[in-house]
Image (cartoon, rainbow, N blue to C red):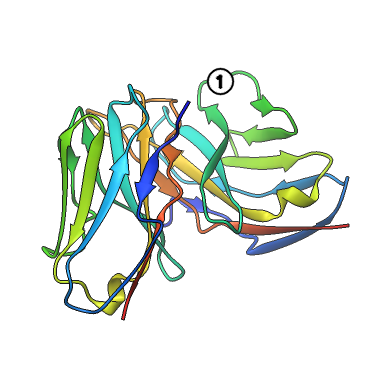
Amino acid sequence: AQKITQTQPGMFVQEKEAVTLDCTYDTSDPSYGLFWYKQPSSGEMIFLIYQGSYDQQNATEGRYSLNFQKARKSANLVISASQLGDSAMYFCAMREPPGSGYSTLTFGKGTMLLVSP
Amino acid sequence: DAGVIQSPRHEVTEMGQEVTLRCKPISGHDYLFWYRQTMMRGLELLIYFNNNVPIDDSGMPEDRFSAKMPNASFSTLKIQPSEPRDSAVYFCASSFGGGNQPQHFGDGTRLSIL
């Protein structure tokens, strides 16, 4: 079963507008973490923002914020005031603790965001 | 601070040849990860190390793939013999500790097997 679902293959937004990229996840463990990464056309993977399952407040990092709805198991990324440089693929990822030791990240299939002037 | 450094950035080689990908993690990071990215399968974890010790290699597709980490500042991913279906972008990532620490990725190696 897919653990991370990103239902939007592509999104379009006009410059200076806000955009929300959807991410839903599936886990039965109460302790987990959610990450968002950006992959521009140049190919590198850039860490954007993190949300822990026990965090009381939604994470924010500059123009990025995470709309975390635990009961719905969703962790949507909100980009405010879009810029042309935001055009990229965006990946949602989840860390689940295994029984012991370090846990690994499971990535969604990504959403391609295009920002138009 | 220097990020994760991978080499080469691009590699084109013929089927059957040995391929070696290299990675230098961020200094002080104790976890190192190798991923493969393809259009069909997305990002897949191949193997990861903790303090230079391989912890989980269940993602390594076949015996043709091997990875080593002889010291804290260097890791290799080797494919021998290479096949066209190994063509992909291979990423190395590192992190300090587990939990909420993000993995920091290198720029990747774009591998093409002809």
Chain where mark 1 sits: A
Q: Residue at x 31, y 81 (%)?
A: B114
Give coordinates of residue A18: x percent, y percent. 83, 44
Q: Residue at x 80, y 39 (%)?
A: A80
Q: Nearer the viewer, residue A9 or A2?
A: A9
How many residues crowd mark 1 within 10 Å: few (<14), some (14–19), many (20+)?
few
Q: Residue at x 41, y 27 (%)?
A: A31
A71 w.r.t. A21: above or below: above
Secondary element under disc 1, as helix, strand or loop, is loop
Q: Nearer the viewer, residue B84 or A2?
A: B84
Give coordinates of residue A5: x percent, y percent. 53, 54
B19 w.r.t. B85: above or below: above
Q: Nearer the viewer, residue A24 or A12?
A: A12
Left or right of A30 in this view: B83: left
Tag 1: amino acid = Asp
Left or right of B88 in this view: A69: right
Q: Tell me where residue B61 sits by quadrant.
A: bottom left
Give coordinates of residue B30: x percent, y percent. 28, 26
Q: Quadrant of the N terminus of chain A?
A: bottom left
Left or right of B24 in this view: B65: left
Extreme left residue here?
B63
Q: Tell me where residue A10 sits by quadrant.
A: bottom right
Give coordinates of residue A21: x percent, y percent. 68, 49
B33 w.r.t. B31: above or below: below
Q: Which residue is disc 1 drawn over? A: A55
Q: How many marks?
A: 1
Q: Residue at x 88, y 57 (%)?
A: A117
